[in-house]
């Protein structure tokens, strides 16, 4: 069910070339960051709300119903909802493949870095033209 | 075990490192620096992997209560709207700082004379000027000479590139006819000896694996160690001891295994930050100073200043690649730095333009700021945020107030049972007015370039980096702890050289001034050592 949840949060967007969240290795992420219990608690609560609301498991719901359940979850337990959502974002937006598609610039370990073009300091002419603005006083 | 040195320096951060280098030029001296943390290997910094953003909420967090490294001590800041940020390790907080490096202004040292508030400093900008210059050469400071908000600078490294976002923001300031200038940044923009130059990757504040950021482990320390300064890492000084004449005669410290040692010295120099320094002094109780060393006038830990921040974020329609470049350093404005008749507050603030957030921060803050949703529209909204944002941080000058203070916390202790600290801090009405004005002016700037303001708030919680005033300098031993050389009024061979001796806070980042003061103090020590010991 975890993949269904992740893809509800972050579905794929084929127009922008972005994969759904289930394509990143969330299992490896949860092991590395030791959040297995958070995931268990989240899925358990989600199942409960889903059944209470629609008498169905979350994965059996349509998209609109899933969003409704997530909205209800947020109201019932904002802390757990936010924690899990943060981990979902973290897993997704630290994935090398995702970062590459986003064109975030150089990816770690940053062999090349990012090139920013040289500046034309004529842009400072208005500041120069105003003259000195620092506070002067007689006795230093 | 008892060891003996000529000079002991406690703390290896910005000021401790500058002190070590300055004093080590006299190679006849045995100098030992004690650092309670360990030496970080830059190849272990999180920027080596794609999940570097996550380290900011873990082992490289600037919050010691989250980081919980073995060198950290608990800081209870529940009585403060601003959390304390620091790093305990070789190089101190410079390992995680953003490397902002503006100087204080001449007027900052004369606030009583000019604005009839707080106190004047017992030293002046012109006395410090040669030491500002010396420090900037060693730290490697990028910027541009000719800033109309300062007296003339001698020289600086080439400025950090503005990037597309910086140029747009610069134009906004030009439209308002307000001051702006490229940031002063201790970031190498030119190839210097063994240090690489900045490659504009952004995340300076999880440690610069490139080595371009001027943290003192790559600037002062290689020079000081070459001159023979010994560094005892994982060595936690918990007490400065006095001899029968009331002079400092050394320190007691715990090694990595918690074993007690004594090190004797002729001169003791404290450089543990505006929090760590009062913690050590308050913990150093004796018959002469039953309430803590140098605390006979009750000023140790008092007058904490912290530079409250406001933050305003704007979103642009166009992709400005705003996340590229050193995150904290782009441009600054000191248009509202000074007291003005048309303001309802005294003193003022600096505006710092910050680059856009990296991906994870964009997603998380975007969601909680209601700029980005989950579900079908997520990617489209992310695409409209990432690389489209700029931030303005408003750094307010807070004034010294006795009730803003640090005290020992015996309920929360470090790994070896030494007390942590409690911080009590309240925003003054003046500070609140400064922050409110800064937010209003920042919104005006964003409106000049049709950026949509998506968030604005003050104070920003996790920004307590600038820790000042808790062992202030002055000429009167009743109202200050040290003289202008950092020399304790009551113990002539004990010096404090970090920002805890600041009299007022200014509205500029404190590191450049703290290090200049350190060099000034150590110049005095070298020239007068025969009279001090």
Image: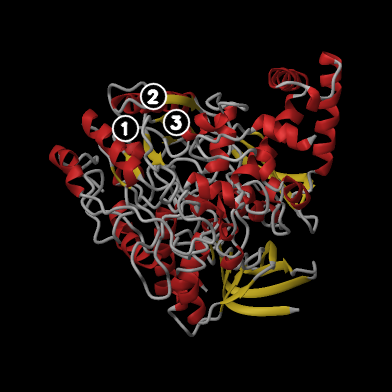
**In front of the other: B218 or A36:** A36
**In front of the other: B124 or A104:** A104
Q: Classify mark 2: helix, strand or loop.
A: helix
Of marks 3 and 1, the one in the foreground: 3
Among the two numbered marks 2 and 1 on one chain, the one whose residue lies closer to the N terminus = 1
Do callouts 2 and 1 mark residues in contact (Cβ within 8 Å)?
yes
Among the two numbered marks 3 and 1 on one chain, the one whose residue lies closer to the N terminus = 3
Residue, x 76% and y 47% (percent of image)?
A27
Q: Which residue is mark 3?
A: B313
Tell me the distance, in whole angstroms, between the alpha carbons under discs 2 and 1.
9 Å
The reply to the same-chain question for discs 2 and 3 is yes
Q: Could you tell me residue B532's position as x and y percent?
A: 49, 71
Of marks 2 and 3, the one in the foreground: 3
Q: Which residue is mark 2?
A: B437
Q: Is residue B243 visible?
A: no
Tell me the distance, in whole angstroms, between the alpha carbons under discs 3 and 1.
19 Å
The chain letter under disc 3 is B
The reply to the same-chain question for discs 3 and 1 is yes
**In front of the other: B380 or B51:** B380
- Position of residue B220 relative to residue B170, above or below, is below
User: Dividing the picture into quarters, in which one does residue B255 lie?
Assistant: bottom right
């Amino acid at each position: 069910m975890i993949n269904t949840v992740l893809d509800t949060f972050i579905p794929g967007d084929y127009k922008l070339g972005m994969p759904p969240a289930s394509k990143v290795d969330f299992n490896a992420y949860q092991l590395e960051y030791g959040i297995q219990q958070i995931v268990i608690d989240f899925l358990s609560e989600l199942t409960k709300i889903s059944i209470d609301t629609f008498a169905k498991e979350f994965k059996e719901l349509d998209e609109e119903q899933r969003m409704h359940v997530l909205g209800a979850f947020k109201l019932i337990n904002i802390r757990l909802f936010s924690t899990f959502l943060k981990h979902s974002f973290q897993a997704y937006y630290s994935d090398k493949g995702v970062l590459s598609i986003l064109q975030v610039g150089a990816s770690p370990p940053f062999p090349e870095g990012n090139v920013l073009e040289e500046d034309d300091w004529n842009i400072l002419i208005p500041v120069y033209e105003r003259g000195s603005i620092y506070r002067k006083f007689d006795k230093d | 075990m008892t060891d003996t040195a000529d000079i002991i320096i406690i703390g290896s951060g910005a000021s401790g490192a500058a002190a070590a280098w300055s004093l080590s030029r006299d190679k006849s001296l045995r100098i030992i620096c004690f650092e309670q943390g360990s030496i970080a290997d830059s190849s272990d910094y999180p920027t080596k992997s794609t999940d570097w953003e996550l380290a900011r909420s873990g082992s490289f967090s600037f919050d010691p209560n989250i980081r919980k490294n073995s060198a950290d001590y608990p800081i209870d800041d529940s009585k403060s709207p601003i959390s304390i940020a620091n790093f305990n390790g070789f190089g101190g907080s410079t390992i995680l700082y953003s490397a902002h490096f503006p100087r204080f202004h001449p007027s900052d040292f004369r606030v009583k004379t000019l604005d009839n508030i707080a106190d004047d400093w017992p030293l002046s900008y012109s006395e410090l000027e040669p030491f500002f210059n010396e420090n900037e050469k060693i730290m490697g400071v990028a910027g541009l000479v000719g800033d109309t908000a300062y007296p003339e600078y001698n020289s600086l490294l080439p400025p950090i590139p503005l990037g597309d976002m910086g140029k747009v923001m610069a134009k906004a300031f030009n439209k308002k006819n307000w001051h702006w200038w490229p940031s002063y940044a201790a970031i190498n923009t030119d190839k210097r000896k063994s240090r690489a130059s900045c490659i504009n990757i952004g995340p300076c504040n999880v440690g610069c694996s490139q080595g371009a950021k001027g943290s003192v482990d790559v600037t002062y320390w290689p020079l000081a160690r070459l001159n023979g300064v010994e560094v005892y890492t994982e060595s936690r000084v918990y007490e400065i001891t006095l001899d029968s004449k009331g002079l400092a005669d050394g320190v007691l410290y715990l090694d990595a295994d918690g074993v007690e040692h004594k090190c004797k010295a002729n001169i003791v120099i404290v450089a543990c930050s505006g929090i760590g320094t009062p913690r050590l002094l308050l913990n150093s109780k004796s018959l002469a100073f039953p309430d803590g060393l140098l605390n006979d006038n009750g000023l140790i830990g008092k007058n904490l200043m912290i530079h409250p921040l406001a933050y305003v974020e704007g979103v642009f329609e166009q992709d400005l690649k705003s996340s590229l470049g050193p995150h904290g350093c782009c441009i600054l404005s000191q248009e509202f730095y000074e007291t003005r008749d048309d303001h309802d507050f005294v003193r003022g603030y600096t505006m710092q333009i910050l680059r856009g957030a990296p991906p994870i921060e964009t997603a998380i803050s975007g969601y909680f700021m209601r700029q980005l949703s989950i579900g079908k529209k997520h990617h489209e909204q992310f695409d409209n945020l990432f690389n489209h944002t700029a931030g303005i941080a408003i750094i307010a000058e807070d004034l010294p107030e006795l009730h803003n203070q640090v005290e020992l916390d015996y309920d929360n202790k470090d790994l070896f049972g030494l007390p942590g600290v409690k911080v009590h801090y309240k925003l003054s009405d003046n500070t609140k007015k400064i922050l409110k004005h800064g937010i209003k002016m920042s919104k005006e700037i964003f409106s000049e370039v049709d950026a949509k303001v998506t968030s604005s708030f003050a104070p920003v919680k996790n920004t307590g980096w600038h820790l000042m005033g808790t062992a202030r300098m002055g000429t009167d031993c009743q109202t200050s702890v040290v003289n202008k050389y950092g020399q304790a009024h009551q113990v002539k061979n004990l010096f404090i050289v970090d920002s805890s001796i600041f009299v007022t806070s200014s509205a500029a980042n404190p590191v450049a001034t703290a290090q200049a003061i350190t060099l000034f103090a150590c110049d005095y020590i070298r020239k007068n050592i025969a009279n001090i010991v």
